[in-house]
Amino acid sequence: MRAAIGDNARVLRYAFISAMADLRAIYTWRTWTFAWLLRMLAQVSMFALLGKMLGSAARTQYLLVGNAVLVMAFAVLAICASTAWERMAGTLPLLIASPTAPFVVFAGRSVQWLLDGVGCSLVSLFLLAPLFGVRLPMPAALLVVPLVVLIAVSVYCFGLVLASIALRAMRLRSLIANTGSLSLMVLAGVQVSVSFWPAPVQYLANVLPLTHGLQAVREVLADGRLADIGRQAALECSVALGWLVLAGLAFRHLAESGRRDGSIEFGG
Amino acid sequence: MSTGENVAEAVEIEQLSRTYQRKRDEQPRLALDHVELRIQSGEVHGLLGPNGAGKTTLCKILSTVLLPTSGTVRVAGHDVVTETDAVRRLIGIAFGGERGLYTRLTARQNLMYWSALYRQSSREARTRVGSLLHRVGLADRADERVETFSRGMKQRLHLARALVGDPRVLILDEPTVGMDPVAARDFRVLVGELRTEGRTILITTHDMAEAEAVCDRVSLIDGGRLVATEDPRTIGRWLSAYERITAEVVGSDLADRLQQLPGVAAVRTEGPGRVIVETDAEGACAEVLRVLVGAGVTSISTGRPTLEDVYLKVVGDRGLVVR
């Protein structure tokens, strides 16, 4: 058991090195800051301005906090693209044919987006909140940092499931990622409260990542009780775990169905 | 080398068939048709065939990334369907082209990554990776990103990656595609070294010269069927026996004379005065040329048959007997 954990840890370590190499190839710190981050700040500002236009400080806070956390999901769901790179690079059949479950590789393959997403989210929140007059109660507001990390991990687990689908339906990978991020944007309590939706949609929202974590962030910024914050964080953890288990099953299914139907091609 | 049961046959394939059907309403396409093949431990076995013959399908099944439709395949005594994990520890795979590597990582990082996937300890991996980089001549470039490598260097790294798990059976699918002649020669030397280590190698290729150079036995595969399994020198003799001579301005009398020559398989007329003579015996080509030149014909060209021509001959001679 200990040996298996050690083996998987080594695989994850090299998957992480590969992920960071990808990140360095895609962004320099300048292009990340002045292109990607700026685009995210513009998106959050646009929604916060809608709140301002409505003349409601509460609305402004709701939209700013929701969208500042949401931009992390946009970044993290790039996992659909980076997972698909394995097929394009021709490494997928080699992973399937190795003695390690491909899920372990894929779990570590896209962690660069976690750093990207958490960075975008925290900068958006802590930079824009004062500009839009949103109060950040210090030092309690610092609790938002681990909560955003937790939400990012949860979205990552959700993204792994989407990525396993994208790996099967390569041409639809952008559509799958966008459907995932838009679902979170609409249903997870970012723009409107979850209670706005009919009951069946609320059930769905409650099993999506972000929903409970975002609620915990809102509780922190509203000086909420630690018990309430902890409960929402625990629910987010449960949701993350559920998606992680589903992702493990999805990748196993991908490998097995690929073996059956011949969709795992040598060289691509 | 990875340990496995000490079986004499590294690969046993019995009545292996594989069909593909992408859509339910689509007619199933037969990629492998009742293939029977046994490869001894330590043998270098070539699989020759044109595109779409079924070579890669066979490699994919041996690599455990594709399930057979029927039949059984065992690697070192382990069934590829029911003992997948055991098989995966015993095999190494490399395919031609530039894909299959993490180009943003260095050569060393690539190999360390794959050694982790093959469950090697860090210490074991460092030693093995260092020695493999030396072996494939990449030690000086070990810490450079693969995206800066030439195609030949990537191919060598591919081979090193296939060896990282210390496999007992190596599956090389068109490994020299795109290699320059020097790299291809180095590759052949390396295959020879691997054979002396007792590894079993299955190599698919279009290139008869390559098969002759490195293989102990060669199987011809066409349309999913194993047409013949022979010593590569035998197939080389077939290639030298089957030649084609094209001549212009040849009268019908001369064409008839050519048809009577020993070793002439066929004489076809294509257009006015143009004949194509096919031979199927060594020395027949020289005799045909002598007769043509003696008759004053000066527009003559000769050509070696393609592998496809040889398959057709072999299929004709053997009546699709599967060995």
Image: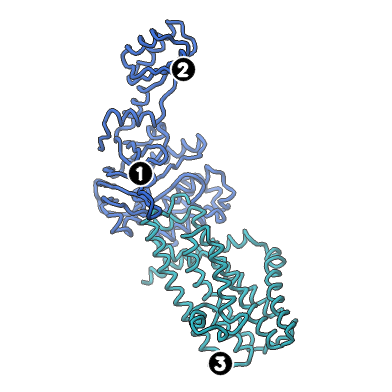
Chain colours: A cyan, B blue
Tell me, for residue B201, which label it has, or none: 1
Tell me, for residue A226, which label it has, or none: 3
| Marks 3 and 2 close (CB-CB < 8 Å) | no
Q: Chain of mark 2?
A: B
Does residue B232 appear in this view? yes
> For the residue labelled by badge 2, is the local secondary structure a helix, a strand or a loop?
loop
Residue B245 locus on image (x, y percent): 42, 18
Residue B98 locus on image (x, y percent): 52, 47
Q: Chain of mark 1?
A: B
Residue at x-position 25% and y-position 51%: B6
Tag in front: 1 or 2: 2
Mark 3 Cα-neighbour bin, 10 Å: few <14, some 14–19, many ≥20: few
On the image, which quarter does residue B264 sit in? top left
Circle nearer the N terminus (1, 2): 1
| Marks 1 and 3 close (CB-CB < 8 Å) | no
Amino acid type shown at disc 2: Gly
Tell me, for residue B271, which label it has, or none: 2
Amino acid type shown at disc 1: Ile
> For the residue labelled by badge 3, is the local secondary structure a helix, a strand or a loop?
helix
**Same chain shared by disc 1 and disc 3:** no
Tag in front: 3 or 2: 2
Location of the N terminus of chain A (image quadrant): bottom left
Residue A132 locus on image (x, y percent): 74, 82
- Relative placement, left or right, of B285 versus A195 is left
**Where A54 falls versus B182 (above or below)?**
below
Tell me, for residue B22, which label it has, or none: none
| Marks 1 and 2 close (CB-CB < 8 Å) | no
Tag in front: 1 or 3: 3
Mark 1 Cα-neighbour bin, 10 Å: few <14, some 14–19, many ≥20: many
Residue at x-position 28% and y-position 59%: B82
- Relative placement, left or right, of B143 versus B244 is right
Mark 2 Cα-neighbour bin, 10 Å: few <14, some 14–19, many ≥20: few
